[in-house]
Image: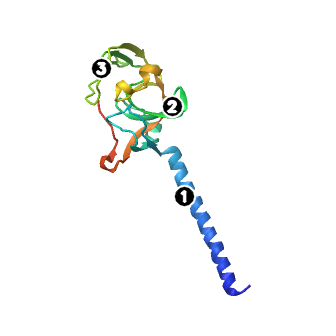
Amino acid sequence: MSSEDQTKNKNNEWSLYEFLKFTVITLLIIVPIRMYVAQPFVVSGASMSPTFETGQYLIVDQFSYRVSEPKRGDVIVFRFPKDPSKFFIKRVIALPREKVIINGEEIKIITKDGEEIILDEPYVELNKDSYSETLLGYNEYFAMGDNREASLDSRVWGPLEEKYIIGKAFLRLLPFSQIDYLPGEFDF
């Protein structure tokens, strides 16, 4: 074997070594971030319209709820309780140990301290005549889509247990014209 062939072999070995090293380092950085800090989510369906539309690309913050709890108004991504292989995006309407009273277009929350809150949601149109009362337990949330007429939410499948919550909408990256930090955030 000539010295030129030996040099090519060493360069090929070195390139393979560098590629494997780069791959391992990348995996050591990306995998923990993806598993514990943030993950991508693509909106599918009309349940959060006009706040979010089909095809919008979001980054979900998975870390915040490890150190704090969801609050009223947060837009969350969670595993659907009836089929945990599916992911949903909805808004937190009520918190643990609160009572939700839906009377037609009015949504009233009675907090665990007895305070009454009537939700003022200018982004929502409610047209249905309906009545329901739901008392939430410990670690249960009431989640609803902003497009109430097209949303499969806690009104249908009941309270959302905290264990199903993945995180909150942190960034909207697509479409570029609507890039936003904490998209859909609304303070009641």
Query: Of the numbered discs in the image, which one, if any, rests on residue 131?
Result: none
Asked whether residue 65 appears in the rendered view, the answer is: yes
| Amino acid under disc 3 | Asn
Image depth: mark 1 or mark 3 in front = 3
| Amino acid under disc 1 | Thr
Element on which disc 2 rests: helix
Element on which disc 3 rests: loop
Circles 3 and 2: CB distance less than 8 Å?
no
Q: Residue at x 48, y 45 (%)?
A: 37
User: What is the crowding at mark 3: few (fewer than 14 residues within 10 Å), some, or many (at least 20)?
Assistant: few
> In the displayed structure, does residue 3 sit left or right of residue 168?
right
For disc 3, the marked residue is 127
Q: Nearer the viewer, residue 136 or 15?
A: 15
| Amino acid under disc 2 | Tyr
Query: Of the numbered discs in the image, which one, if any, rests on residue 164?
Result: 2
Query: Of the numbered discs in the image, which one, if any, rests on residue 26?
Result: 1
Judged from this view, the residue extending furthest toward the right is 1
> In the displayed structure, does residue 121 sit left or right of residue 135?
left
